[in-house]
Image: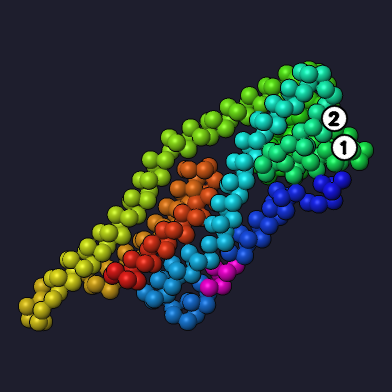
């Protein structure tokens, strides 16, 4: 009964995530306001914003990476869990006994929730109620849908082996489609990174090799310029920051289907922007 008294890993994680995201947002906002009051809308303010925003996003980025790994682990183990139930049903083992056997196996991040569900059944809750709790604790949309489907199948009866087998096949197909989608969209992710890298490289070349070169010399021999170097740097820094933020979020949406997955890409691009404008320009 220890599984009933002790919260599962995914249960705790689902409550930690919003706190980390909110903390990163608050830290970033406070830093932005403080820097604005201290520096105003200056070049140093923009550079500092890029750095502090990137640093404040580190907890959120790490959280998102861990969350993405947990979600993949849960969805990939759902198929194994369902096939084990289907095999048990085919062997004539009652559903409750099959669930108890499944609770002794390892399903990665899904293990804690399976054991919690079985512990509730052993305490006298119905299978439908326990599956309903599993749905409430589900970390991924797919596991939530599967828990709902299983609860309805158990409630209305029928050939559960067929239900479990068909659902397992559905989960397997969904996971395959996700992997295929990720593989096909990887080149587009690279395109976004390359475009931002090209922007930074062109900024360095124009600043060092063009603007500075034609303004070197005594005042009478200087070529008059319509572009002021400082304002050029300011404009390019603004452009790089905007592209880093929205480009990173777009990369997350393309690669993983959710905007929050772009937090880690935004952090990387903002750090690259800060490094280039601080040390190379």
Residue 131 seen in the figure: yes
Label 1 neighbourhood size at 10 Å, few (<14), some (14-19), many (20+)? some
Residue 238 seen in the figure: no
* Residue at figure coordinates x 62%, y 65% from the top left: 23
Q: Main secondary structure of the magenta part?
A: helix
Label 2 neighbourhood size at 10 Å, few (<14), some (14-19), many (20+)? some
- Secondary structure beneath label 1: helix
Determine whether, in the image, residue 241 is placed left or right of residue 228.
right
Residues under labels 1 and 2: Cα distance?
8 Å
Return the x and y of residue 132 as percentages of the image width and height: 80, 38
- Secondary structure beneath label 2: helix
Q: Is residue 231 magenta?
A: no
Return the x and y of residue 155 as percentages of the image width and height: 84, 27
Residue 121: mark? 1
How many numbered circles are shown?
2
Determine whether, in the image, residue 35 is placed left or right of residue 158.
left
Mark toward the start of the polypeptide (1 vs 2): 2
Quadrant of image for the C terminus: bottom left
Return the x and y of residue 4 as percentages of the image width and height: 84, 47
| Residue at the spot of label 2 | 96
Return the x and y of residue 275 as percentages of the image width and height: 37, 67
Quarter holding residue 188: top left
**Cβ atoms under marks 1 and 2 closer than 8 Å:** yes
Residue 77: mark? none
Colour logic: rainbow
Determine whether, in the image, residue 280 is placed left or right of residue 153.
left
Query: Depth check: 135 or 219 in front?
Result: 135
Highlighted magenta segment, given as a residue range: 26-31
Q: Is residue 29 magenta?
A: yes
* Residue at figure coordinates x 29%, y 69% from the top left: 280
Residue 89 vs 256, above or below: the answer is above
Quadrant of image for the N terminus: top right
């Amino acid at each position: 009964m220890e599984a009933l008294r002790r919260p599962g890993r995914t249960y705790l994680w689902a409550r930690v995530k919003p706190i980390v995201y909110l903390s990163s947002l608050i830290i970033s906002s406070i830093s932005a306001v403080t820097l604005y009051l201290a520096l105003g809308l200056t070049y140093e303010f923009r550079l500092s914003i890029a750095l502090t925003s990137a640093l404040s996003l580190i907890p959120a980025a790490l959280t998102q990476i861990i969350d993405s790994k947990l979600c993949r682990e849960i969805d990939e183990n759902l198929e194994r869990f369902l096939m084990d139930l289907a095999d048990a049903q085919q062997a004539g083992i009652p559903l409750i006994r099959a669930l108890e056997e499944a609770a002794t196996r390892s399903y990665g991040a899904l293990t804690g929730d399976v054991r919690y569900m079985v512990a509730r059944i052993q305490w006298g809750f119905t299978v439908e109620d326990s599956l309903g709790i599993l749905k409430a604790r589900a970390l991924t949309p797919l596991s939530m849908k599967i828990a709902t489907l299983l609860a309805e199948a158990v409630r209305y009866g029928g050939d559960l082996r067929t239900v479990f087998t068909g659902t397992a096949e559905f989960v397997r197909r969904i996971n395959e489609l996700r992997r295929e989608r990720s593989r096909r969209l990887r080149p587009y992710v690279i395109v976004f990174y390359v475009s931002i890298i090209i922007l930074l490289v062109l900024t360095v070349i124009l600043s060092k090799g063009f603007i500075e070169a034609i303004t070197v010399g005594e005042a009478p021999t200087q070529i008059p310029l319509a572009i002021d170097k400082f304002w050029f740097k300011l404009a390019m820094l603004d452009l790089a920051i905007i592209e880093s933020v929205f480009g990173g979020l777009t990369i997350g949406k393309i690669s993983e289907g959710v905007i929050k997955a772009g937090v880690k890409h935004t952090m990387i691009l903002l750090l690259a922007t800060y490094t280039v404008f601080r040390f190379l320009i």
